[in-house]
């Protein structure tokens, strides 16, 4: 189903809130009203514009840890995103991948920003990245966006429904297991090793018989589960307030995916990790393989 936004002439829209158009340059006037979901969209688009503009250039790298770095594009994209958020919501707290946490330590509202998920891809001139922006209000993610700067697609949710926006037209996201493609994150950290390592799935005969693995090394693949382009996604990690995964998890939940930790527990509890699947059958099959591949079982 395609849903159009309200236009400048005030023609009816299926969305309940009036949409404020994205301002070229990223800044949003603080005196103008804007919903949280449209603010997240505006901020993510501002970051995506920077990522597109700087793609292919020779970029300065800032070493963060062994094998991990940020580029000038990460830093500039995050700055553009934060400028938009702070102009409209100056009292909200923010956690950015590159700048860390700012704002009140007990803030009820926290923006989670990953300006360029897939930095190693980007630095190698591979167009597989995402710009992630999410708002946690209390314990819930109430607005989230995962933008693909190169496909000019913006996956978004208001916490209840999930859409992809192309050319100002919204299409509802519909998960599907039909592709049989399962994206497996092989990047660290691995807090559940040696008990669980996602790479073991690739050597499992039952996994190979039922699924086809993919490794794109960006959380754009989580949004693809919500969109029906992947049957599932698997990763290790402790993901509470994760700037990398908050947007994708919110999209998948709103789209109706099955979302748990690596042993079927509610997200952010127990061993952690993440198994997102388009349907219960796919989810159950993955949990069976994961349980059997773990030395101690479940």
Image (cartoon, grey):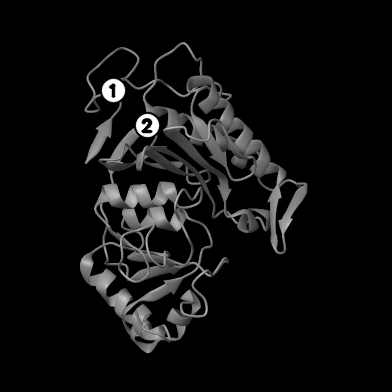
In which quadrant of the rendered image does the N terminus lie?
Answer: top left
- Picture quadrant where residue 169 is located: top left
Q: Position of residue 98 (x, y in %)?
A: 64, 44
What numbered label is drawn on residue 180?
none
Say which residue label 2 marks.
37
Disc 2 crowd, CA 10 A, few/some/many (<14, 14-19, 20+): many
Q: Are marks 2 and 1 in contact (CB under 8 Å)?
A: yes
Give the CA separation, mark 2 to mark 1. 10 Å
- Front residue of this view, candidates 71 and 12: 71
Say which residue label 1 marks.
17
SS at mark 2 in the image = helix
- Front residue of this view, candidates 94 and 44: 94
At 47% from the left edge and 29% from the top edge, which residue is drawn? 42
Mark 2 or mark 1, earlier in chain: 1
Q: Is residue 209 above or below residue 273?
A: below
Number of marks in picture: 2
């Amino acid at each position: 189903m395609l849903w159009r936004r309200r236009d400048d002439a005030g023609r009816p829209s299926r969305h309940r809130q009036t949409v404020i158009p994205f301002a070229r340059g990223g800044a949003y006037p603080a005196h103008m009203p804007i919903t949280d979901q449209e603010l997240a969209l505006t901020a993510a688009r501002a970051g995506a514009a920077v990522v597109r503009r700087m793609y292919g250039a020779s970029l300065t790298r800032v070493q963060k840890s062994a094998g991990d770095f940020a580029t000038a594009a990460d830093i500039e994209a995050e700055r553009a995103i934060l400028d938009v958020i702070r102009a409209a919501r100056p009292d909200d707290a923010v956690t950015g991948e590159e700048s860390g946490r700012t704002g009140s330590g007990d803030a009820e509202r926290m923006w989670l920003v990953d300006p360029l998920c897939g930095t190693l891809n980007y630095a190698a001139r591979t167009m597989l990245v995402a710009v992630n922006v999410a708002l946690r209000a209390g314990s819930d993610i109430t607005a989230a966006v995962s933008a693909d700067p190169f496909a000019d697609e913006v996956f978004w949710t208001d916490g209840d429904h999930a859409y992809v926006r192309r050319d100002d037209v919204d299409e509802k996201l519909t998960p599907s297991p039909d592709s049989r493609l399962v994206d497996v994150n092989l990047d660290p950290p691995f807090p559940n090793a040696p008990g669980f390592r996602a790479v073991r799935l690739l050597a499992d005969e039952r996994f190979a018989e039922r699924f086809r693995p993919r490794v794109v090394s960006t959380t754009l693949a989580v949004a693809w589960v919500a969109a029906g382009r992947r049957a599932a996604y698997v990763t290790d990690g402790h993901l509470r307030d994760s700037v990398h995964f908050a947007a994708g998890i919110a999209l998948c939940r709103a789209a109706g995916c099955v979302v748990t930790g690596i042993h079927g527990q509610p997200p952010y509890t127990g061993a952690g990790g993440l198994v997102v699947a388009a349907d219960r059958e796919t989810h159950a099959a993955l949990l069976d393989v994961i349980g059997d591949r773990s030395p101690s079982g479940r």
